[in-house]
Image (cartoon, helix red, strand yellow):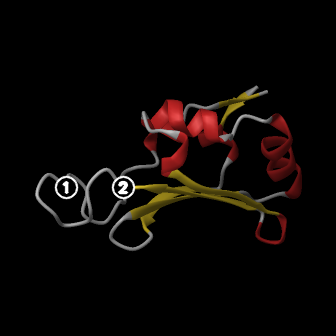
Amino acid sequence: MATLFEMAKVLRSKNSGPFELTLDVLFDSLEKFQKVRDSGKLTVQTICSLYNISEKEVRHIVFFEPALGVKITILRDVSSGSVGDRDVYGAQQHAPLMNVIIE
C-alpha cells in the first residue's frame, strides 16, 4: 500500500486554458502505472470528492499507457486571472491527489 505521491515520478497541475485545470500523474515504470490504473482509485467519483466538484465538472480522466501517465481535466471554479482566482497558473492544485491510497 502506498500513496499516489509515493508511486508517481511526477504529480503536477497546470492550466488547460483559462477555464480548465489539468492534473498530470506520470510514472517511471509500467508496473506502477498499471497498479494505479487497475486499482480503480482514480475515478470521477474520487476526483469529485477530492475537489468538491460535481461529475459534470470532470472533463476527462485518461490513462495513457504509452506515456505511463494519467491526465485528469477538470473545470476551474473561477477563470484564470479573474477576481477571486487564488492560483493563476493552476500550479498548486495537485495536492489533493497526493494522499490517495493505492492498494
Residue at 61%, 33% in the rendered image: 46
Mark 1 and 2 residues: CB-CB less than 8 Å, in contact?
yes
Kindly indicate the quadrant of the structure image that contains residue 40: top right
The residue at which mark 2 appears reads as 76
Q: Position of residue 55 (x, y in %)?
A: 55, 42
- Quadrant containing the N terminus is top right
Q: Earlier in the sequence, mark 1 or mark 2?
A: 2
Looking at this rendering, what residue extends furthest in the front direction? 56
In the rendered view, does 70 fall on the left or right side of 22? right
Kindly indicate the quadrant of the structure image that contains residue 80: bottom left
Q: Crowding at label 1, few (<14), some or many (≥20) Cα neighbours within 10 Å?
A: some
Labelled disc at residue 85? 1
Residue at 11%, 58% in the rendered image: 83
- Of the residues shown, which amino acid type is indicated by label 2? Arg
Distance of label 1 from label 2 (alpha carbons): 9 Å
Q: Position of residue 56 (x, y in %)?
A: 52, 47
In the figure, 101 relative to 25: above or below?
above
In the rendered view, does 28 fall on the left or right side of 44? right
Q: Tag 1's secondary structure?
A: loop
- Of the residues shown, which amino acid type is indicated by label 1? Asp
In the rendered view, does 49 fall on the left or right side of 17? right
Residue at 31%, 66% in the rendered image: 89
